[in-house]
Amino acid sequence: MDADLAALSELRERPGGTVRLTATEYAATEILLPALAKILPKYPDIHVEVIIDYGLTNIVAQQVDAGIRPGELVAKDMIAVRVSPDLQMAVVGSPSYFAERKRPKTPQELTNHNCFNLRLPTHGGSLYAWEFEKNGRELNVRVEGQLVFNSAGLLLEGALKGLGLAYLTEGHVRRYISQGQLVRVLSDWCPAFSGYHLYYPSRRQPSPAFSLLVDALRYRATD
């Protein structure tokens, strides 16, 4: 029945149907929504369901059309389409937080700070170690603090409220840094990573609606 409905949808003059995607909060907000804003007004018969998930979703088993994850997490048997440039991490805290504490100059000095921990299924449910690199030297730091979250959005809100330091994607916090709501530290220690990719099974036959979405999401260096 699903296949018949999809075939009927493809016979329409305008692409239509529902596309189901899984993404992290950051990817959904900063990458997916801007792309959807380009195409959805032009194609009212296309519907998109966005599922926020930090795990490595089995998109076939979960009946999801595609996922958006950092490139290094995408399985080799998937088609991967780059949807963002390389990204960098950032350690941030509010001006009120740093009013009573010295800004760390090395990752080791984070032991003197109240840092937010992040617990994600992509790391086996364990707390995520903050990753640093400088001059070829890699360093993972198990930070300590009063708060543990499983959401990047809560990390950001906690940092804005002066409750501690957060380790987030630079794009997540850039506007708050420029507005003076957050202060960035250890920028020379924060490595870049391969950016986000849209992934889907190689055996999948893309519908016109899905193909439009892929093209809208595809990262182009001149974007």
Image (cartoon, rainbow, N blue to C red):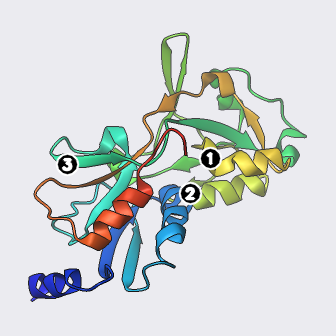
Residue neighbourhood size for the residue with mark 2, other residues' Cα within 10 Å, grouped as few (<14), some (14–19), many (≥20): few
Amino acid carrying label 2: it is Glu
Q: Name the residue under label 3.
A: 78
Q: Name the residue under label 2.
A: 30
Of labels 3 and 2, earlier in sequence is 2
User: With 116 as the anchor, is 48 left or right in this view?
Assistant: left
Q: Are marks 2 and 1 in contact (CB under 8 Å)?
A: yes
Q: Name the residue under label 1.
A: 171
> Disc 2 to disc 1, how far (Cα)?
8 Å
Residue 105 screen position, x and y as percent: 73, 21
Viewer-closest of 181 and 87: 87
> Disc 3 to disc 2, how far (Cα)?
23 Å
Amino acid carrying label 3: it is Met
At mark 3, the secondary structure is strand
* Most distant residue in the right direction: 99
Q: Residue at x 45, y 45 (%)?
A: 127
Quadrant of the rendering where the N terminus is positioned: bottom left
Residue 34 screen position, x and y as percent: 55, 63
At mark 1, the secondary structure is helix
**Rendered position, 77 above or below 154:** above
**Rendered position, 51 above or below 139:** below
> Disc 3 to disc 1, how far (Cα)?
26 Å
Residue 8 screen position, x and y as percent: 17, 87
Of labels 3 and 1, earlier in sequence is 3
Residue neighbourhood size for the residue with mark 1, other residues' Cα within 10 Å, grouped as few (<14), some (14–19), many (≥20): some
- Numbered mark located on residue 91 in the image: none
- Residue 54: in sight, yes or no? no
Amino acid carrying label 1: it is Gly
Viewer-closest of 111 and 175: 175
Instruction: Answer with the quarter of the image where residue 157 lies.
Output: bottom right
Of labels 2 and 1, earlier in sequence is 2
